[in-house]
Each structure stands twice: as structure tokens, then as C-alpha cells.
Amino acid sequence: MKFGATYEEYLRVEQDKYLGQCSRVEYKRLKKVLKKCRVGRSLQADGANDDEQEQGSDEYSDVCECNSCTLCDEMFFTELNKEASEIAGCFRSRVQRLLHLHIPSGIQRYIWRFRQCFIDDQQIMVQEGRMLLNYVTMNAIAIRKILKKYDKIHGSVSGRDFKSKMQTAHIELLQSPWLIELGAFHLNCDDLDADELGGGGFFKNGFFKNFSCDLSGAQPLLTMTISETLKYEYSLTCPICLDTLFNPYALSCGHLFCKACACGAASVYIFQGVKSAPLDAKCPVCRAVGVFGHAVHMSELELLLKRRDKDYWRQRLREERTTMVKQSKEYWDSQAMLSMGI
């Protein structure tokens, strides 16, 4: 089955049932636009007779009269950019809500525990997580395929350039830190289920077999296998300290760092936090500016790493606390000297 038919079937079953309020890629309609472009180019390339040329001029005057397609350049990418932004926003908000239920804080923690005495919501949350994973994957594939078709029809690299712009605008769906959080969420649910059921794991032979976290190798990895052709691998090594991530944060460009390393790169104290970085602070990896202000604390990934290697986590926690105490003393000593005019 071609992707277009698969995508339409997905929308019919999943979108209407679970994601009626969420945006999606208008793959079928955008494909029709490209079909008009292909027909317009064929008429010109074949050297149609005068009547056909006159008719073609009326029908395709706004489509593909030259190598630069006015309709596509002005409408196609603008609309696709809007759809990608809305999909990224919907995916982010839905994953945030899901994870907030999974790792509640404050009084909500006690309400959640009380609720668990009567209702087991874990399987419901897992099903929603799986639905969100399918949602972001299908739309990401739709964007990539429609951009590939655009370049094929127009004989250009505009589609490839647009993908680069998506990465710069932080709306590349498969590079979203929330996708990593979703994978960590599934692994955390699997770990919890295995503990509760004596190591068997209710979902062990089902959906969770597609997820793995390997911290024993030279390169710690989080792996998510969605299908035979789709496999996501995310490095869990901090690019600065070159060790396994601890208290991980994702900058808005998508790169992961330990909190202490990110703060050090932005020249702020750990107790001040990653988001207190100056507006002109750059990502240590891609050198993008302004990526600290919307940094994401990867709470599910933190929980996963903590459960998988408790000894390492305790060691790093002691080191971070020692550094924080030292930095706090330096900060308040400097503030005291400033207040005394020294």
C-alpha cells in the first residue's frame, strides 16, 4: 500500500478517534497541488499545439510557468510550515499533559496515589503514549515525502532547504525532545510493570519490545523502533563532560546536556538554572543563539537513567551538590562585597 493510502487510513481511524482537535499534514491536498505542477510542466515540455497552449495558459498560469513555481513558493511552504508548527505544538502539549500525570508533584502526587487505589490508569496512559508516537511519526513521514515529491517535480532542492529551515525553527518533529521523553516514559512504564509482576512485565511481549535503553556500551543509547524502516537512536552522552547524562536538559535546538554542563556553557550558576542564561548564549554543539530560554527538563529521561544505574546517579548527585554549595558561597561572597562597595 502506498503511503498516501496508509496515511488516509491512519487519519480515518486514529485522527477522528483520538486527535480530532490536533493539526495534521494535508498530504492529499498538497499532493494535488504538485500534480497540477507536473501537468503544467508536461504541457510546456511536450510543445502542445496552439489551442492546447492557450488552454494551458489559462489553467496553469499560476502554477509552473518557469523553474520557480509561484503557487508552491508562496503557498506550499508557508502552509506546510504552519502545519508543522501546529503539529509540534499539539504534540508538545499532549506529551506534557501525559507526563504530568505520570510524574505528578506537590499535592497532585497524593491525589494521584489516592486515585490509584480505585483506578489503574497506567494502561490508558500507555495507549495514549502509543497514539502520540504514531501521530508524530506519521506526520513527520508525510512532511518528508511531500518535500521529496516537490524536489522531484520541480527539479530543485527547495524541499531539502525547507527541512533545514524546520530544524532551525525547532519544528523538526523527529528531533523534538518530547519524542525522547515519550520513549523514556514507555520504558519507565515497562520497568515499573516488570517490578510489580515479578519481572514478567504485562507489556513485555507487546509494544515495549520496540524500546530499549543501553547504558553499558561505550555510547549509551535510547532506541525506539517504530517499524522495519523507522528506527530512532538518541545518544545519552553529554557532549561537554562526555559522560552519561545527569539531570538532563534539552535546549530548544534539540541537543541534550547535563544541567551543570549547560549552565557552565552559558556562564550561569547551577542554582540559577539553565533558563537564566543570557539571551545571546549559544548552544555548545550547533552554536544556535537563544536556545536556553525554552530549555526542557527531561524528567522522564532523568527517572529512566536514575532507575537503570542508581550507583552512578548517586555519585553524580553528590558531585553536583558539592559544586552547587561551592558556587553558592562564591555568589553570596561576591554579593556581599558589592553591597559593601569593595
Image (cartoon, helix red, strand yellow):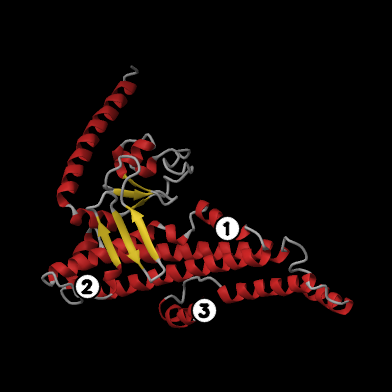
Give the CA separation, mark 1 to mark 3. Answer: 22 Å
Check if mark 1's residue and mark 2's residue have beta carbons within 8 Å: no
Q: Which residue is mark 1?
A: 160
Residue visible at 19% across and 75% down in the picture: 202
Secondary element under disc 3, as helix, strand or loop, is loop
Residue depicted at 25% across the width and 61% down the height = 103
Towards the viewer: 280 or 42? 42
Q: Quadrant of the C terminus?
A: top left
- Amino acid marked by disc 1: Arg
Q: Nearer the viewer, mark 2 or mark 3?
A: 3
Residue 106 location (% of width, % of height): 23, 57
SS assignment at label 2: loop
Vertical position of residue 68 compared to residue 334: above or below: below
The local secondary structure at tag 1 comes to helix
In the rendered image, the vertical position of residue 304 relative to residue 56, given as above or below: above
Type of amino acid under label 3: Lys
Circle nearer the N terminus (1, 3): 3
Question: Which is more toward the observer, 205 or 94?
Answer: 205
Q: Between residue 262 and residue 53, name the one nearer to us.
A: 53
Mark 2 or mark 3: whose residue is earlier in sequence: 3
Image side of residue 2 versus residue 331, left or right: right
Q: CA distance from mark 1 to mark 2?
A: 39 Å
Residue 12 is situated, as x and y percent measured from the top left of the image, at 47, 83
Determine which residue is flagged by label 3: 2
User: Which disc, if any, is residue 204?
Assistant: 2
Outermost residue on the left side: it is 198
